[in-house]
Amino acid sequence: MRTSTIDAGQRKAGANPIRWSGWLAGLLVSVLLWALVYWVWSAV
């Protein structure tokens, strides 16, 4: 019980940077996808 509480606390404390890095990763992936789509579209 105690370990789960500590784990929950750590997860709550580290949620913000993880969320930010995930958001940035998603943004980067979407930008890369749009660049790929644009490159293919211009190639055709």
Image (cartoon, helix red, strand yellow):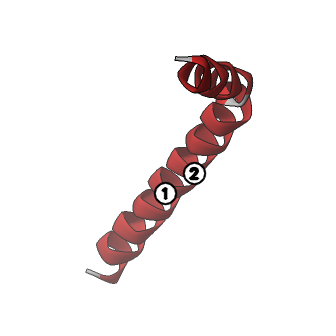
Residue 4 in the image: above or below residue 20: above
Residue 20 on image: x %, y %:
67, 35
Q: Residue furthest front?
A: 1
Task: Tell me if label 1 and label 2 are in contact, CB under 8 Å.
Answer: yes
Residue 8, x across and y down, in percent = 59, 21
In this rendering, the count of numbered labels is 2
Residue 2 locus on image (x, y percent): 60, 18
- Comparing 13 with 34, the one in front is 13
Element type at marker 1?
Answer: helix
Q: CA distance from mark 1 to mark 2?
A: 6 Å
Left or right of 17 on screen, residue 2: left
Between residue 3 and residue 14, name the one nearer to us: 3
Give residue 25's mark: 2
Residue drawn at x 49%, y 63% is 32
Q: Which residue is mark 1?
A: 29
Q: Nearer the viewer, residue 22 or 27?
A: 22
**Amino acid at the residue labelled 2:** Ala
Residue shown at 60%/26% (left/top)? 3
The residue located at (55%, 46%) in the rendering is 27
